[in-house]
Amino acid sequence: MHFSNYISDLLYRYECVIVPGFGAFLAHRVSAYHDETAQAFFPPKKRISFNAQLKENDGLLANYVASAEHLSYESALLKVQEFAMNIQQKLNAEETLVFDKIGTLSQNEAGNLSFEPEQSTNYLTEAFGLASYTAQPVTREVLAQEAEALEEKAPIHLTPARRSNGWMKYAAVGLLTIGLSGALGFLYFKDIADHNFAEKQKAESQIENTIQHATFTIDNPLPAVTLNAFKPKGNFHIVAGAFRIPENAETRVNQLREAGYKARTLGENKYGLHQVVYGSYTDRTEALKELRNIRNTDNPNAWMLIQELN
């Protein structure tokens, strides 16, 4: 049995998953934070830890295994206990255990357990689709300093003779140029405005004639289009991803439909993300079975959302 997958599924929805007779995996919420040294921003998440003191059976893992494997509760609990004994024997033999998407667990010679969480999986569903990013420092001050250095190397010197003799001549030429360009510019822009108005009138006349012609020359009406739409039902949804841009969500839906899934979007959630699902199911067992199949064949990061939709 894939107990790592079962524990991983439960960590998305619960803060504590106990393996009876062995210990518990805990999920602690961590707020978003900024690493000043690396200039990186990290989204909120759940940090996974392990507590060997919590061993009492609370029924959560056994019930989940029973539902997923179609077993009785007693049979599922027995398999969970066998799993706990097996991993304890491996730890006693100084083996390092790897729990997929959860972390690694080892035991030293003194019998103390050491757990190292896996960092790539974020079990906080509210932050699904959010990733860390690095901010680049602003170089505006550096560029300003470089410009000042260039000015110091190549200063412009104006002699008194240049100041007194040349400015009146250039000012007179400048005023004459401005006067001529203003008059010519007025005539030029007036011609452009008249031309644009005439072209606009001509275009509107052509469009009106075309519309009238099209209205009376359509002989063969288009055939009726039949839309074969489906409205999935159920509160168990297998999520393929969440997208900030609606067009990206629609593209993902089309890809999944071409692959044979009854994909759709669930609309925009409270974080502004558009969730895309492989399908929706009314039966929990059927949804779990399809989730395992999708993880094995298409998307190992798919997860199940339990939500009642209108």
Image (cartoon, rainbow, N blue to C red):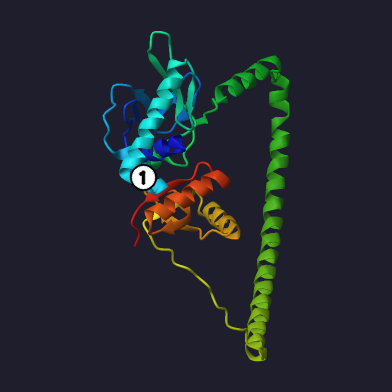
Q: Position of residue 31 (x, y in %)?
A: 36, 30
Which residue is pictured at 55% across the width and 78% down the height?
226
In the image: residue 218, left or right of residue 273: right
Q: Position of residue 28 (x, y in %)?
A: 33, 29
12 or 62, which is in the foreground?
62
Q: Is residue 297 above or below residue 56?
A: below
In the image: residue 165, left or right of residue 139: right
Which residue is pictured at 73% across the width and 41% down the height?
173
251 or 57, which is in the foreground?
57
**In the orientation shown, which residue stands out farthest toward the top?**
110
Q: Which residue is mark 1?
A: 66
Q: Position of residue 83 (x, y in %)?
A: 41, 31
97 or 308, which is in the foreground?
97
In the image: residue 244, left or right of residue 21: right
Q: Residue 231's quadrant in the figure?
A: bottom left
Q: Is residue 243 visible?
A: no
Which residue is pictured at 48% across the width and 33% down the height?
101
